[in-house]
Amino acid sequence: MDRRLALRQLVTISSASRRGALPRLVPAARFKPTSFRRHASNVPRAPLPMPPDMPRENYAEPAMYTVSYLSRVIKFLIYGAVGLGITGYASFEGLHLYVENVCLATPSRDPSGDEYGWQEENQGWTGGAKGGTDSRLGWKARHALRGAWICQEWGAGGTRASIGRSVHPDFRGMIGSKINKVDRGYELAEEYIDIAIAEARKRGLVFPPNISAVSSTPETLTTGADPTAVDLLLLKAGVLERIATPQTLGQAKDIYERVLAASGSEAPAQQAKTMRLAGKVGDLSARLGEGGADWWAWGLRRAGVTVPEPPEPVAKGWFKSASKRAPVSTESTSTTAPSPLSPPVLRATISLLISTEANLALSSQLERAASVQDFAAALIPTITPSSPESALHDLWLSHRASLLLLHRANVFHALSRPALELATAASVQSDGALLAIPTYPTSNPLYPAAKLLHRDAAATSAEAAWTKGLLLEKTDLEHASDCFEKAMALVEERGSDWEKYWRSFARVRSRMEAAMPSEADLNNE
């Protein structure tokens, strides 16, 4: 069959070739398959569609994802930083507003002329009668003052003590060198106050002039200083006094002298302020070993008060050297009583007399100290409180009367005279004053004075209880132990005073335990 078809095709081709219908055939030997493939490859082809479920590769997508991720992270970081900054700044300013309007709201100057002058005794933070800080100081100085208050009242945080700057850095680590450890909060407070003082000088506030060491006497007084500048100097002096190194005490004394030289008003409130400054200078002079009697006497003369002289000893025997001590009188030895004093001047006078008699007792001038104590006690009147100011004034006088009783008990004991009744009376009176002190809000003008009076009354009560315990230690150990325990409870912080009371308490308790019969003795009985 195949052969027939092949023959039929040959016949057809041969007949067609005769008629010229077909082209001449190319010999089979000359046909090349590669030429067919070459022509076939030049034919355009349509791309085949990819399956819909086949994954596609996009090389730009990872880079875009990375950029988008980083942009979101940066955006969140920026938002977080801005949020933290706003929160921190709001907290910072909120704290300063709280200190300005609450903690420093107590006025320090009284334009109405209060009879008792409590506002004039408040520590001023440059705000005056309005409280707070002075707007003339500017943003930086006012914030520095608030920072000083925070460091002074709340501490610096972290370490409470640091090595004083008065010690040279090369000698701070040497064995045997005396290192002054001070509260870090006080150091920072001093630095902030220095910033405020520098800003006040830039703004033209008039400060009291410096006083040379040659002319620093009670009689060298000048006038003319801005009250805000005076407040700044008093703040710095108060912080230096709390640091309590010899160098800072000397600097505080110099500052008080500068402020004292600028006070020249004769008003009762300003007169009392001048007397208090004289007492400050005298106290610091005594602590520095320079003697403060001249300053105390000068302050008392401002009120027309003169320190009485002790009675002359009575001479007995053949020689004057055999004379005996004159008995200490319980009445005032002054021949003339001063004119009635205003309440602020009276408080300043009593404070100066207490400093004078305490210094005399420490220098072994017991008779003279006793006479000054009697004179000061005679100046304390009995008043009927009619207002909160007069009630606080009466409590102040009651506390100072108990302090005089305590000092008199110490003098009597040193003179080998009975002192237990005086110590007991001092303890009872100081306890009564301590319990009667009212509580005031921080914005009340009486709050700072009441706070200081409460602190002083607690210290006096503790010291009176300790003195009473010492006098009872030889006769009544159990009662003495109770007195020492009471003294420890009245002390707010565990400082040197608490350690002194604790040593006395431990000594008495050990003696009581030694006096008790042992368990073996009880079994034998």
Image (cartoon, rainbow, N blue to C red):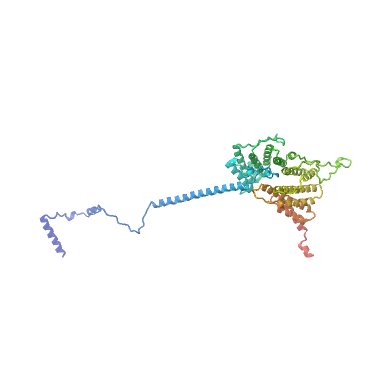
| In-image side of 340 versus 318 (left or right) | left
Residue 129: x and y in percent read 64, 43
The outermost residue toward the right is 318
Residue 221, by quadrant, is top right
Horizontally, is 220 left or right of 21 in the view?
Answer: right
Residue in front for this viewpoint, 274 or 270: 270
Q: Nearer the viewer, residue 92 or 253?
A: 92
Quadrant where the N terminus lies? bottom left
The answer to whether any part of residue 160 appears in the image is: no
| Residue 484, x across and y down, in percent | 74, 53
The C terminus - image quarter? bottom right
* Residue 227 in which image quadrant: top right
Q: Nearer the viewer, residue 170 or 288?
A: 288
Q: Position of residue 314 (x, y in %)?
A: 86, 42
Q: Residue at x 60, y 48 (%)?
A: 98
Residue 49 sits above or below residue 271 on the image: below
> How far across and down, in percent of the image, does residue 324 sit?
85, 44
Q: Is residue 19 visible?
A: yes
Residue at the far top: name it: 214
- Numbered-mark total: 0
